[in-house]
Amino acid sequence: MDKFTTLETILLQLKKDLTNNKNLGAWDEKCLYAEKSLCCRSRYKLSDQCILAASTNVSEDDIEHLPPEIEAMELGLYCYGQNLVDVVSSVIEQRPRATAQELLQALNYHTINEQI
């Protein structure tokens, strides 16, 4: 499992991976986790501290379970890796030189409109 890092660092790394056509399967199979107080906010911030780790598991009764190491740290689900890939790839397709702030704005837009 990775260490805590900022959302800004994660967005820029994903942008770099997408630009260099690196294998994105690893991103799809992971999620971002953070302190539960950050997870319940409606907007992300570049300074948010999070961990990129294994994705959640869905049981036979359709209950989503966090990885044991994430539960042990008392963290919550912050963002799905697939959502990050979808948003960042869409943005850099339109604006290859997009900044971290522009990626964040797109992620917040996606999150707010997905909840409606």
Image: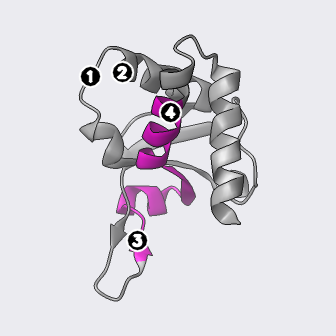
Rendered residue at 33%/45% (across/down):
28
- Image mark for residue 90: 4
Task: Say which residue label 1 marks.
Answer: 22
Q: CA distance from mark 1 to mark 2?
A: 5 Å
User: Do the residues bearing badges 3 and 2 touch, measured as CB atoms within 8 Å?
Assistant: no
Res. 101 visible in picture: yes
User: Do the residues bearing badges 1 and 4 touch, measured as CB atoms within 8 Å?
Assistant: no
Task: Say which residue label 2 marks.
Answer: 17
User: Do the residues bearing badges 3 and 1 touch, measured as CB atoms within 8 Å?
Assistant: no
Q: Secondary structure at mark 1?
A: loop
Q: Secondary structure at mark 3?
A: strand
Q: CA distance from mark 3 to mark 2?
A: 28 Å
Observer-nearest of 20 and 76: 20
Sooner in the amino-acid sequence: mark 3 or mark 4: 3
Give amino acid for label 2: Asp
Task: Say which residue label 3 marks.
Answer: 65
Rendered residue at 37%/61% (across/down):
67
Give amino acid for label 3: His
Give amino acid for label 4: Ser
Q: Magenta segment, which residues?
A: 64-90
Q: Is residue 109 above or below residue 70?
A: above
- Find residue 93 and report its horizontal and vertical position in percent: 48, 24
Sooner in the amino-acid sequence: mark 1 or mark 2: 2
Q: CA distance from mark 3 to mark 1?
A: 28 Å
